[in-house]
Image (cartoon, rainbow, N blue to C red):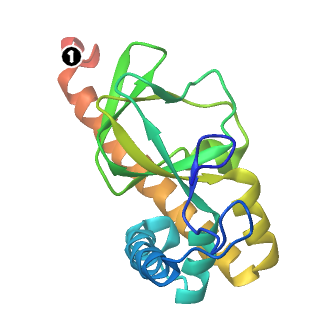
Amino acid sequence: MENDTGNTPLHQSEQNNNGIVDENKDADQRAVASDSEFIINILKKLPIFKGLSNFQHKKIFKICYHKRFNKDQYLCEEIDKSNEMYILLSGKLKVIYRGKTLITYISPISLVGELAVFTSEQGFSSVIATENSAVLAIQKEDIFTLLKNDRSMTFCVLMNFISELANKLRKDDEIIEELRKKIPSNNSKDQ
């Protein structure tokens, strides 16, 4: 069942559109339970959600929904403010800066868009599907509501976010240092 935006929620109602309970309810509940366990295990693998309790992971699961992107379709553009972050389940994405510079490729079970969601800034880069891709999407408003109502989750997620930013800065520093070594310095001519 898809909602009016074309996105598929992960947790389905037991009733059909007429309010009648589905005859295959037990089979559907087993499928949803299996899907939920699978998704919760994915959430546990993401560094930003590290250290959360099972109950907290289940809360996050409840705000996730499936979304599909075709090859060459944009998930987000650097000129837009993003209201979603994505967990890549299948496919492949690329991150482009200023419409032309390839930054990186993103493989499954990776988070993308969290920086724009948590900083409320315009996107820093564009993310494009390089093949048909499936993601879990989390709306900014939904994650902020969860964080507002659960202080321990807030602390854990924000500490993980800061740690991930620090790791990215450290890697960027290493890349900058390697590039500096490749560029001849003006000081070497003086010596």
Residue at x 61% of width, y 82% of height? 56
Residue at x 39% of width, y 46% of height? 134
**Badge 1: how crowded within 10 Å, few (<14), some, or many (20+)?**
few
Q: In screen coordinates, is 104 left or right of 138?
A: left
Where in the figure is residue 117, as x and y percent of width and height? 66, 47
Q: In screen coordinates, is 187 left or right of 66?
A: left
Residue at x 65% of width, y 65% of height? 16
- Quarter holding the N terminus is bottom right
Q: Quadrant of residue 133?
A: top left
Amino acid type for the residue under numbered disc 1: Pro
Q: In screen coordinates, is 136 left or right of 120?
A: left
Q: Quadrant of residue 130?
A: top left
120 or 76, which is in the foreground? 76
Where in the figure is residue 136, as x and y percent of width and height? 49, 54
Which residue is labeled 1 in the image?
A: 184
Where in the figure is residue 14, as x and y percent of width and height? 63, 75
Residue at x 21% of width, y 29% of height? 181
Q: Is residue 67 above or below residue 64?
A: above
Where in the figure is residue 123, as x and y percent of width and height? 61, 31
14 or 136, which is in the foreground? 14
Q: In this view, does 79 lie above or below 159?
A: above
Q: Is residue 173 above or below residue 38?
A: above
Task: Report how many numbered discs are placed on residues in the image.
Answer: 1
